[in-house]
Image (cartoon, rainbow, N blue to C red):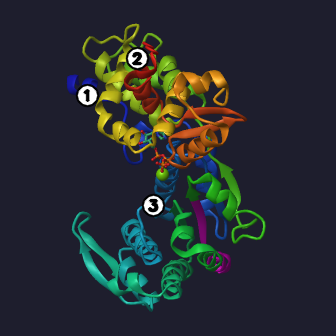
Amino acid sequence: MATEKRKNPFRVGGTVVGRYFTDRAVELKRIGSALGEPGAKLLVYGPRRMGKSSAIESAVWRLRRKRQAAVIADLSAATTVADMASRILQGATRQLRSSWESVVGDLVNHLRVGVSIVLDTAAGHPTLVLDVGQRNAPLEEQRDTLAEALDAIERLAEEKGRTIGIALDEFQEIHRFGGEEAEWHLRGVIQRHRHVSYVLAGSKESLIEAMTGRNRAFFKLFELLPFGPIDGRHLARWIDSRLESHGVRPQGAGRRIVELAQPRTRDIILLARSAFQIGARTGNLREGDVWRALDQVVDEEDDLLRADWERRTALQQNVLRAIAAAEEKLYSEAARDRFGLRGSAYVAAALDSLIEADLVVKLGEGRYEFDSPFMRRWVVRHALPDVGIILT
Ligand SMILES: Nc1ncnc2c1ncn2[C@@H]1O[C@H](COP(=O)(O)OP(=O)(O)OP(=O)(O)O)[C@@H](O)[C@H]1O
Ligand SMILES: [Mg+2]
């Protein structure tokens, strides 16, 4: 029991499910019903680190408990269209085994492309790999391979008389490898399938908005599910109760954690995890401990944060200093003098680069904020003193 108490109740890294996952009732319901309904098409999109992948995974867990079949393929680290096909086939063999022992053989029967059956040693059962030549094949051929992978699942669903939900996470990558033509091709495939359903998810919002815009392949093909922050009060209460049940008296820490790290779920949970480590030493979280937890994360991530900083130009670094100091008028003469900025056109270009690099987000006209509360804190601690600003 004592070890259970000391075990960190917050988990970060990869997707979270079960007791590490909270809320998202509306989203789970929509994702779950889309995955279970033949022909349904849902697009889940929102900023990074909000918890999209975890919500999809949780929805799939629930479906499996009801013995419904679903496949998730994470396309984020794919490098070619052929890799996307591989990931879909491997996801299918891994995740449909509980529904059909014979899934590997069944899928092979439905495939024309060259595949081999190999042992997935980590999972301890056979899976499918595409012949490596596929990765270097001309793009049209790779597109056909992707279509075949999805067609094979469609035919499997038809043959078994069951719906199979297919979730494609970070699907927008198809644009990077295959451009608009690959998008149109995928649209054609998705549209002709009757026995599977599709939930596509992605976090590159501007790209997704373009892909679903007028005259583009995914225009009006999907129902849309925008994915925003978890309600702050709910999350604060959940954090408090997780702390409490693991032997740490929160004394209002949940609310401070949410305030300091919002709006991305991952950042909030990462700060909560760090706060738990501090609180577990005495069984209490005291005034100031949440700030200590923030600095602890910043210290732990120093290498990465410093590397992000060092990659920026001098002007971009000065713009980051100004944003960290909550300078509201980035284009004013006073800001120019104080932070060493240059003319408006230069500052605007620097802001564009910082947004492009996911370091800064635009909140509204002329209003900018750091993408990460940890990067913000890093700049406050390590770079603001250069311009004579010491914030504690
Ligand atoms: N509903 C939730 N309850 C608790 N923690 C969550 C929840 N959703 C996300 N998290 C936290 O956020 C982290 C990131 O979640 P996830 O990978 O699902 O987000 P994402 O939106 O898919 O991110 P990315 O843009 O990086 O793909 C998780 O590891 C977990 O710590
Ligand atoms: Mg994700």
Q: Which residue is mark 2?
A: 291
Say which element carries label 3.
loop
Cβ at disc 2 under 8 Å from ligand 1? no
- The residue shown at (23%, 67%) is 124
Pinpoint residue 303: horizontal percent, then vertical percent.
Answer: 29, 38
Whichever of callouts 1 and 3 sits on the residue coming sooner in the sequence is: 1
- The residue shown at (63%, 29%) is 330
Image: magenta residue range:
187-200
In the displayed structure, would residue 348 be above or below residue 333?
below
Q: Which residue is mark 3?
A: 76
Q: Which residue is mark 1?
A: 4
Label 2, label 3: how far apart the Cα atoms are: 33 Å
Going by the numbered disc 1, the residue's amino acid type is Glu
> In the rendered image, is residue 311 in sight?
yes
Pinpoint residue 89: horizontal percent, then vertical percent.
Answer: 42, 75
| Position of the C terminus by quadrant | top left
Task: Report whether 99 appears left or right of 218.
Answer: left
- The residue shown at (57%, 26%) is 234
Going by the numbered disc 3, the residue's amino acid type is Ser
